[in-house]
Image (cartoon, rainbow, N blue to C red):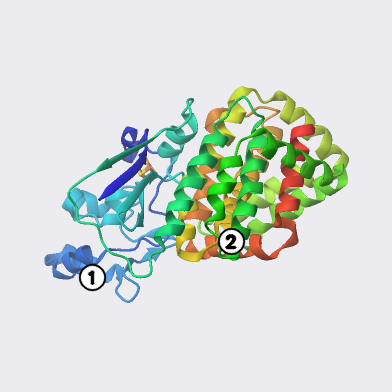
Amino acid sequence: MEYIIPHYFEQFQCVAAECEDTCCAGWAIMIDEESLERYRNAKGVFGDRLKNSIDWKKGCFLQQDKRCAFLNSDDLCDLHIQGGEQMLCNTCRDYPRHMEEFEGLREGSLSLSCIEAAKIILGCKEPVRFLRFEDDVEDEEYEDFDYLLFTKLMDVRGYIIGMLQSREIDIMTRIGVALDFADQLQEAIEEGEVFRIDEMLEKFGGAEMFFDFEQKVKRNQMSEIEYCSNMRKMFRVFRKLEVLKADWPEYIKGAERTLYGEGQRVYQERLQQFLGSMGEEWSIWLEQLMVYFVFTYFCGAVYDGNALGKIKIAVTATLLIRELAFAEWIEKGQQLGFDGFVDIAHRVSRELEHSDLNLIRLEKICQKSFLFSTEELLGVLLYEKIV
Ligand code: SF4
């Protein structure tokens, strides 16, 4: 089996009781078959507690007030306290390490939803490198795995990530080029012309591609009013998502008031000040966010053919995190530090990435709503470039 991981993958260490967050609250923890068997056979008083704390139909731990039934009042795990690490199910043992599975390949990443992992992902100053290695685990054969499409997606992802890391280019242009390229790629996939991708990649990153892109941008230039109205509507997408953590809706409402409550003119003035005040670090944070989302999701398009949808999720999540960061900057008296940004990114990731329902909903919205069409998203991205 072959593996690909980001170079910082092994740096993660859980800080357990020292953690300022807890990963056992807010979402249903799915239990693997082997652990379920172990829990079913557990004896004594603790065995009884185990049996009564699992939803055996769904195969997950029960929750009380959206907290795992084993999370005690000190925010520690009773299962770990009683039985040690070997008592944990795979989800709890592996988190925040995440694996995407493909035929012959496993891709590991750290989940942005863990605050310590988020510090590593966003705190990485250099462009992320991806390490490949193999072990003796037999490759599993997947039925109907489209190996040709997968190889092309891997090639495209390599190019897109390389371009997102081209720091001599403005970050919003980099994101825009990725989106624009994914749009063309989607056309080739839908027309059954996957072979065209090689040709497209030959032009990728060249002067001609940037020229075409600049032309498109000029045609799509957004007015101040359009931009503000689009961002406001885009922000409302949060309301359409399943809520995982109880304090999330209030947090989003507060940020919405801060951002748009005083009208468009104030929003615009503040936005200019905000973007003007953010230094070089800001571009690196956005780059790392985009690289994280693209690496984690893009090749999953081999299962549904929706490559553009994966890039739109990356762009939308990055823009929404950006918008929440802007709100935080206003609320904190025009200050936004690394810890504040990490906190926002990990909160968004918790809500979005740990609910399949939310990921599917967002992908559908991105596919159907004009607001999330490539043209509108490009308009928003490039507006920020010229502000
Ligand atoms: S959020 Fe991360 S660091 Fe905190 S307890 Fe969970 S895995 Fe450990």
Number of other residues with Cα within 10 Å of mark 1, as a class: few under 14, some 14 to 19, many 20 or more: some
Quarter of the image for residue 277 reads: top right
| x then y, percent, for residue 76 | 31, 47
Q: Can you say whether 331 is above or below 229 in the image?
A: above
Q: Can you say whether 306 is above or below 2 in the image?
A: below
Frontmost residue, 24 versus 223: 223
Residue 77: image tag: none
First of labels 1, 2 by sequence position: 1
Quarter of the image for residue 286 reads: top right
Instruction: Please name the amino acid that badge 1 sits on.
Output: Lys
Left or right, residue 385 beside residue 306: right
Which residue is drawn at the image coordinates 43% and 56% (left, top)?
Answer: 150
For label 1, the residue is: 51
Frontmost residue, 46 versus 161: 161
Q: Nearer the viewer, mark 1 or mark 2?
A: 2
Left or right, residue 34 beside residue 363: left
Number of other residues with Cα within 10 Å of mark 2, as a class: few under 14, some 14 to 19, many 20 or more: many
Instruction: Please name the amino acid that badge 2 sits on.
Output: Glu
| x then y, percent, for residue 199 | 57, 47
Frontmost residue, 305 versus 13: 305
| x then y, percent, for residue 330 | 71, 34
For label 2, the residue is: 363
Label 2 sits on a secondary structure element that is helix
What is the distance, in whole Å, between disc 1 and disc 2 at their CAs?
Answer: 37 Å
Which residue is drawn at the image coordinates 50% and 65% (left, top)?
Answer: 304
Q: Can you say whether 240 is above or below 110 in the image?
A: below
| x then y, percent, for residue 264 | 85, 43
